[in-house]
């Protein structure tokens, strides 16, 4: 390298930061990974479920605050309320669910 020449350095773009919302409510979640501290769901259909699982009589949700159906590679929130979750992996500290099916 000679002094006085113009050199261009490559630009490195950092990956996008995903900020977890505190609470998420949805009718149905379809994702590769669903992650939360606590999950409340009527039905979970997943390959892998990691966390302490508690069977409940069911989850009642307010329809006005539901985001409807969510399809994404990854869904992350502090607390998730869902009627149904379909995912490859579900990870949470505590999972309250009425019906759990592991594929």
Image (cartoon, helix red, strand yellow):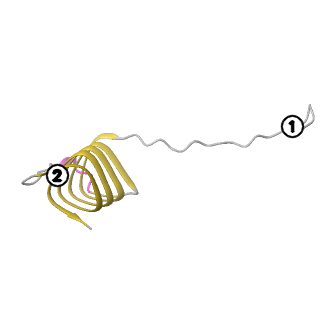
Q: Quadrant of the C terminus?
A: bottom left
Inspect the magenta stretch and tell me whether residue 50 lies in it: no
Residue range corresponding to the magenta coloring: 63-68
Question: Where does the image place residue 79, in percent across and percent down from the top left?
Answer: 25, 42
Q: Is residue 20 above or below residue 57?
A: above
Rendering quarter of residue 32: bottom left
Q: Which mark is residue 6?
A: 1
According to the picture, the residue beneath numbered tag 2 turns out to be 63
Count of numbered circles on the image: 2
Q: CA distance from mark 1 to mark 2?
A: 60 Å
Question: Where does the image place residue 102, in percent across and percent down from the top left?
Answer: 24, 64
Q: Is residue 74 above or below residue 46?
A: above
Image marks 1 and 2: residues in contact by CB distance under 8 Å? no
In this view, which residue lies farthest toward the top?
3
Q: Quadrant of the N terminus?
A: top right
Question: Where does the image place residue 51, in percent across and percent down from the top left?
Answer: 25, 48
Q: Which mark is residue 25?
A: none
| Residue shown at 73% from the left, 43% from the top | 10
């Amino acid at each position: 390298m000679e002094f006085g020449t113009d050199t261009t350095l490559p630009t490195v773009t950092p990956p996008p930061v995903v900020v977890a919302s505190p609470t998420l409510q949805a009718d149905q979640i379809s994702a590769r990974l669903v992650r939360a501290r606590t999950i409340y769901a009527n039905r979970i259909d997943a390959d892998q479920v990691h966390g302490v699982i508690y069977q409940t009589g069911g989850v009642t949700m307010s329809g006005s605050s539901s985001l409807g159906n969510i399809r994404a590679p990854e869904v992350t929130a502090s607390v998730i309320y869902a009627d149904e979750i379909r995912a490859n992996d579900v990870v949470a500290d505590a999972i309250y669910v009425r019906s759990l099916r592991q594929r």
